[in-house]
Structures are given as C-alpha cells and as structure tokens.
Image (spheres, helix red, strand yellow):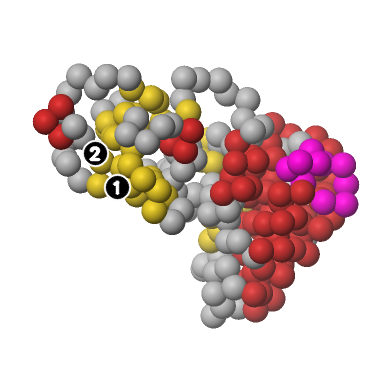
C-alpha cells in the first residue's frame, strides 16, 4: 500500500535481501537475511519523512507484513530502524493487535531481535554503547531518544551548510526549508521555543532538527 505523499524508492522482498547491502552494514547481512526470512515481509524504501524513520503495517486481506524505511538514513540508522519495525511484526505475531505500540511486549521483542546484532562486530563501540542504553531505557524510537539520535547523526556522510538547533546561540535566526525563518528561544523540557518570523507564532522545535543559520534576516523584521 502506498501512503499519501509517499514515493517508493525500492521494494525489497524477504528473499531478495542482498539489495539491502546498499542500506545496511555489510557485516549485518547474514543476520538481516535470517531475520527477514523468518517472516514473509515486504520492505519499502521511501522518500524521507520528517516525523519518523520507518513504520510497520500488519497484514490485511491476505497481504504480507509491510515495513517502510526512509531512504536517507545512514547504514546504522537504517539497521536499527529495521530491527525496530521487525519488533513490531514479532509483537503482532506473538501478542496480537491489542497491545500498546511501544509497550512491554514490543520492548521485549526489540531487545531480543537486537541482541544478536550487538553480539557481532557491526556497530562502532560508541554507537553500540548508546544503543544498549536506549534498549535498557525502553525508549520508543531513535527520534525520541536524543542520545541515540545524536550518536547516529555522527555517522551521516552528507556534508552541507546545515547545523542543528541546539548548536545555535539563543536568539539566533535560522531557516527550515526555503521559506520558514525562525528565531531561537529558550529550551522547554526537550524542545526549543522558536518564533516563526512569518506568522509570529511560537513552535516547539526538536534540538537536533537540521537548519540553516541566518545572520541577518531581511524579511519580517516587524516580528524581530
């Protein structure tokens, strides 16, 4: 099933796992192959989504399990996301639909599936240590655990003029995309209060959101 606004980059079936070498660490392929062949599942690689790295859909009307993962993740982030979504599949198979999405059942499945990968020389030691801490904390995703999110970002290969919101000074100006210009405010719990200079509204912005710093915004000075 293609979701609204979704662009499919590639579709990978359980018996075509070698294609995944473009997206996962090579040393993880035997374990990934065994994991995917344990259940009939279709992996869809999609354009990047801002609110999630991946998702899982249980079978309907005789269809296969479906997992989608963003195409722009580095290989370690892709692998962790794949394990995360496969844990949803296993939780569904073992406990049915009437469980919390990231409840105790899913957390135990996630730990069980991750363990073989952690016992092999797949993750760098610094990232491995943070991933283990995330598993022990029972955090729902790589996006919500800032420590893991930050550790994964260290392995992004792309170079650009982007920086993160948390790296900016308070009251600094930055752009998200081409047209959205903000002024950084104070941190409130886990996110920063930032003023949108176009509409004067305040938004809570993730500390690791990638933005472009602007020295002197030429527009919307009336909201400065």
CA distance separating discs 1 and 2:
7 Å
Residue sitting at 68 percent across and 49 percent down?
80
Q: Circles 1 and 2: CB distance less than 8 Å?
A: yes
Residue sitting at 24 percent across and 39 percent down?
196
In-front residue for pair 50/124: 124
Residue 203's tag is: 1
**Residue 191 x %, y %:** 42, 50
Residue sitting at 53 percent across and 61 percent down?
57
**Residue 138 x %, y %:** 65, 65
Residue 19 in magenta?
A: no
Residue 122 in magenta?
A: yes
Of mark 1 and mark 2, the one earlier in the sequence is 2
Please tell me how crowded label 1 is: few (under 14), some (14-19), or many (20+) other residues with Cα within 10 Å.
some
Please tell me how crowded label 2 is: few (under 14), some (14-19), or many (20+) other residues with Cα within 10 Å.
many
Write down the residue under mark 2. 196
Residue sitting at 60 percent across and 36 percent down?
153
In the image, 199: left or right of 176? left
Span shown in magenta: 118-128
């Amino acid at each position: 099933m293609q979701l609204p606004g979704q662009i499919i980059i590639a579709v990978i079936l359980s018996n075509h796992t070698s294609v995944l070498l473009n997206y996962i660490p090579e040393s993880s392929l035997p374990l990934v192959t065994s994991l995917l062949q344990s259940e009939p599942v279709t992996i869809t690689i999609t354009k990047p989504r801002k609110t999630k790295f991946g998702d899982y859909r249980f079978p309907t009307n005789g269809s296969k399990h479906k997992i989608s993962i963003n195409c722009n993740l580095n290989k370690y982030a892709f692998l962790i996301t794949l394990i995360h979504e496969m844990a949803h599949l296993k939780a569904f198979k073992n406990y049915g639909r009437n469980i919390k999405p990231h409840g105790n059942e899913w957390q135990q499945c996630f730990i069980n599936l991750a363990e073989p990968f952690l016992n092999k020389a797949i993750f760098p030691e610094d990232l491995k240590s943070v991933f283990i801490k995330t598993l022990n904390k029972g955090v729902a995703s790589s996006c919500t655990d800032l420590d893991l999110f930050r550790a994964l970002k260290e392995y992004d290969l792309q170079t650009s003029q982007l920086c993160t919101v948390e790296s900016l000074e308070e009251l600094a100006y930055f752009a998200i995309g081409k047209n959205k210009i903000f002024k950084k405010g104070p941190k409130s719990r886990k996110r920063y209060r930032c003023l949108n200079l176009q509409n004067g509204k305040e938004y809570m912005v993730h500390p690791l959101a990638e933005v472009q710093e602007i020295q002197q915004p030429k527009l919307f000075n009336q909201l400065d």
